[in-house]
Amino acid sequence: MFRSASAVLLAAAALGALSLADTAAAQTLRLGGTGGGMGMAQRITDAYAASGPRIEIIPGLGSSGAINAVADGVIELAIASRQLKPKEAERGLTAVFFARTPIVWVTSHPAPPAIRSADIPGIFEAAAPKWADGSPIHIVLRIASETDVSIVEGYFPGLAEAFATARRRPEIPVTATDQDNAAVAEQLPGSFVHAGLSQIVTENRNLRTVPLDGVEPTPENLESGAYPYEKPFYLVYAPGTAEAAGRLLEFLRSEQGRTLLRDAGSLAVVE
């Protein structure tokens, strides 16, 4: 009799433990996305955990990978640096534009001279480009399919053709991820490549931003319109997580959320 009662108690305890585990899992959301936004996301989710559910950061997915993971139910939320493609939207996903960061040109040069935006394509076309102080510029390329590539090509006329020219030179490094991009730029003397300011800030990268047309690429100058080049961030979610996404967006648009975003090199977008 004693053994039977003990077995019942043990079974009940086990079921109770499983129930608690299920409850904890239900309170944890998984978020992945563009590599350049994950440092910002970590800061946001650390602060959000005090008032909302825990959010686990899933690295290495990229915008497209994370969007597909949300559609497949593998993760609940994604941060993408582009809008949804028609086929993605057809899967019932929603993308909300919640923040923007300056898209910047960065370098390992200790004191980079300002350059003209019109001169950027020529830097990638030249066989041996140089800074204004005469030191060599060593360019870094992103893989052609990267969202950031299409962003900068849209801003700087002639850059797409210049990138194509540079891709024919096998000695130029080509990086696959935002983190690889920054790491190569840190190691290469006089490097020159584009990135989102938020990544450079939140990852504490040993890189300097290059002023364009005499304007520093800061959130304040982006906000005023003095610096016109930006990278967007969208929060992507499926219908089943719309309520949770809505609460996170409400937090991001609060005073605390706007401050967190600005400290991470970004500006909140309030629709």
Image (tube, grey):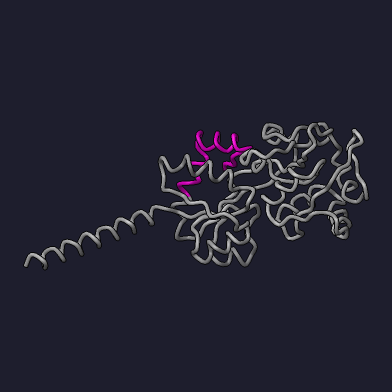
Q: Between 99 and 6, which is closer to the camera in this rendering? A: 6
**Does any portion of residue 266 appear in the rendered image?**
no
Residue 261 occupies which quadrant of the picture? Answer: top right
Where does the C terminus fall, quadrant-wise?
A: top right
Q: Is residue 151 left or right of residue 43?
A: right
Please provide the residue range marked out in magenta: 246-271
Where does the N terminus fall, quadrant-wise?
A: bottom left
Asked if the magenta segment contains residue 262, the reply would be yes
Residue at 77% across, 59% down: 144
Q: Is residue 123 left or right of residue 180?
A: right
Is 251 placed above or below 7 here?
Answer: above
Q: Is residue 148 left or right of residue 98?
A: right
Taken as a whole, is the magenta stretch helix, strand or loop?
A: helix
Residue 172 locus on image (x, y percent): 83, 54
Is 138 placed above or below 173 here?
Answer: above
Q: Is residue 240 left or right of residue 66?
A: left
Q: Between 87 and 203, which is closer to the camera in this rendering? A: 203
Residue 182 locus on image (x, y percent): 71, 46
Residue 145 locus on image (x, y percent): 73, 60
Residue 139 locus on image (x, y percent): 83, 48
**Does any portion of residue 115 appear in the rendered image?**
yes
Is 71 placed above or below 254 here?
Answer: below
Residue at 58% across, 59% down: 66
Q: Residue furthest left?
A: 1
Residue at 78% across, 36% down: 210
| Mark count | 0
